[in-house]
Every structure is written in C-alpha cells, then in structure tokens.
Amino acid sequence: MGSDTYLREITETVDIPVLRKDFTVDKYMIYQAKAFGASAVLLICAILNDQELLEYRELAETLGMDALVEAHDENEVARALKTGAKIVGVNNRDLKTFKVDMNNSIRLRNLAPDNVVFVSESGIKNAGDIAILERNRVGAVLIGETLMRSPDKKAALENLNGGALV
C-alpha cells in the first residue's frame, strides 16, 4: 500500500507528473495531494456525484493540478465529460467482479472527443497491449499491477517499452 510519505519522496525525486491514486472523497484530500507535490488527483465516477466531480476537478485545476476522472461504462464516461473532464481514464477492471477486460477501453474510446486525453487503466501487460490501445486512439496508459507484481521492475519496463505510449 502507498502512503503520503512515499508520494512526497517520489515528487521530490522525479521530474515527471505524479498522480495521487487514491479514492478522493473530499476537498481536503485534493489540498493534501497538492501539499505532497502531486501533479494530479484521481476522481472516480462510481463514488462521486456530478456536483463533486465538477467541484473537485475545478479545485484541482485551480491548484495547478490535473484530474484523472475514472469511468467504467458509457454512463460514467458521459458524466465525466458533462462535468468538464479533460483527462478520462477507463478502468478495464470491473470493480464488482474484479474481472479485467482491456476491450472496455477500446469500446468506450469513441465516446470521448479527441481533445480529451483518454487513458486505459488496468490489465495492460506488455508492449503488444499498448500497441493495440494506440491503434484504437487511446492516448495514455496507467500501469500498476504489471509493474508491482514483477520481481524485476527494469525488465518489466523494458517489456512494456515496445509500445509507443510508454
């Protein structure tokens, strides 16, 4: 599990954007993310109402951060867009069954306009997966489990690096 201490250490060590990948449930957590150096926060449609999505995204942007608005289905993608999301992530893992289907991102990609950064989350295991997503106009990937479960992080990154999005 992560901690805010790790977030601060990472943001002080690297010079790339860092996402606080937490279940953001109130405005205070967005202020915390900024204080710990995060570049972006995660807003999950399944746990926030439209007013919260709008307010939290606007707060993050006011503080100079991005908001990755996570959706799982057509309705949630529509809600993300309606509330002004500039970055929409589609989670390929069904949070009810934990089944992973990478085609979820491909299926939902056409619902977002090209000016929205579209991110595929979960289930991405190798460069071939990334190439398939890229061919389907997915603009970015969020990879966690594949790297965390690998005993050799460098080799795992090299395996993923054949894809253009990495």
Image: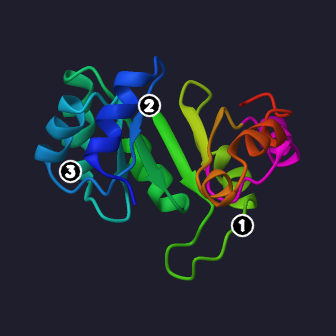
Residue 86 got which mark? 2
How packed mark 3 is, by other alpha carbons closer than 10 Å (few <14, some 14-19, many 20 or more), is some
Quarter of the image where the C terminus is located = top right
Kindly indicate whether the residue at mark 2 contacts the one at mark 3 (C-beta within 8 angstroms).
Answer: no
In the image, 6 versus 24, the foreground residue is 6
Task: Please tell me whether residue 130 belongs to the stretch shown in magenta.
Answer: yes
Q: Comparing marks 2 and 1, which lies closer to the viewer?
A: 1
Looking at numbered disc 3 in the image, what kind of residue is underneath it?
Answer: Glu
Report helix, strand or loop for mark 3: helix
Looking at numbered disc 2 in the image, what kind of residue is underneath it?
Answer: Lys
Cα–Cα span, label 2 and label 1? 24 Å
Looking at numbered disc 1 in the image, what kind of residue is underneath it?
Answer: Asp
Residue 97: x and y in percent read 57, 82
- Above or below, 113 against 126 in this view is above
Q: Which residues are magenta?
A: 121-137
The residue where tag 1 is placed is 101
